[in-house]
Image (tube, coloured by chain):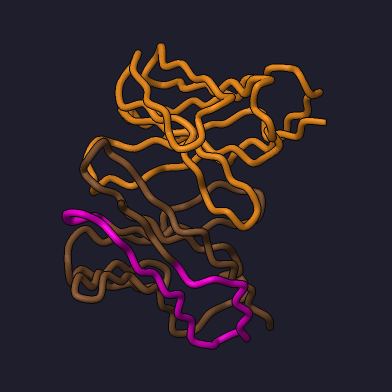
Amino acid sequence: GDSVTQMEGPVTLSEEAFLTINCTYTATGYPSLFWYVQYPGEGLQLLLKATKADDKGSNKGFEATYRKETTSFHLEKGSVQVSDSAVYFCALSVSTGNQFYFGTGTSLTVIP
Amino acid sequence: DGGITQSPKYLFRKEGQNVTLSCEQNLNHDAMYWYRQDPGQGLRLIYYSQIVNDFQKGDIAEGYSVSREKKESFPLTVTSAQKNPTAFYLCASSMRGQNSPLHFGNGTRLTVT
């Protein structure tokens, strides 16, 4: 079935370090892919999305490219800030029944 | 501003009591969803609805019930049959179509003792 696997955390980085959070997926057909961010005690916010192969989603310095050949959608940021500390979720949606599938989340802590 | 409102933010109940969590959206979205979030387990789908007066069970529907009498509202009832109800509950909505992302409320933290 459809599923998302993302890198387990927690991840701890120093400010201005490079960030990669790996995400791979399994899906029948051609899913849309998303990254969400969750700050403590809040709901999830859409960070970026890509709807077809080779699309690059970007927002607030974060980027992810939809790679069909490797079924991946890795999240990257060149220089993280303390304010980026949060939990990041990779997700996919498929056309059948408007269903969404989430990874288990990766906790990121950025230290000054 | 459009968005999803969940209330209350914190809810405390005694074991054996039913409790209803509110979710209202003014985004004019057709689809609405309820997720449960436990530490280290990501999000699990409880129920979803794609249209008024229709809803489907998700992966963990046992012990929960929902209604969708209005497009804007999708309340979730946690019944006494739910064996482990203490969790963070998230409501979400989306437009139809797989390219449309989910929009989330800020969640309700339910504690049952």
Examine the rendered structure and indicate whether residue A83 appears above or below residue B18.
Answer: below
Q: Nearer the viewer, residue B45 or A108?
A: B45
Quarter of the image for residue A29 reads bottom left
Residue A81 in the image: state x and y as whole percent: 57, 77
Residue drawn at (58%, 54%) of the image: B41
Instruction: Verify whether residue A27 appears in magenta.
Output: yes
Q: Residue at x 26, y 61 (%)?
A: A50
Give the vertical position of B64 relative to B87 (above or below): above
- Image quadrant in which you'd find residue B27: top left
One can see residue B104 in this view = yes
Q: Which chain is orange?
A: B
Report the side of A1 relative to B13 (left or right). left
Image x and y of residue A48, in percent: 35, 61
In the image: residue B93, left or right of residue A10: left
Q: Relative to the observer, which residue lies in front, A1 or A87?
A: A1
Quadrant of the image containing the N terminus of chain B:
top left
Residue at 27 percent of width and 73 percent of height? A65
Front one among B78 and A66: B78
Compared to B14, does B69 lie above or below? above
Q: Measuring 50% from the left and 63% from the top, which residue is drawn there?
A: A88
Check the picture and name the quadrant holding the C terminus of chain B: top right
Please state the total of marks drawn on the protein image.
0
* Residue B60 to residue A74: above or below: above
Q: Is residue B18 left or right of residue B23?
A: right
Q: Is residue B1 visible?
A: no
Q: Which residues are magenta?
A: A6-32
**Chain the render paints brown:** A
Residue B59, image x and y in percent?
Answer: 45, 38
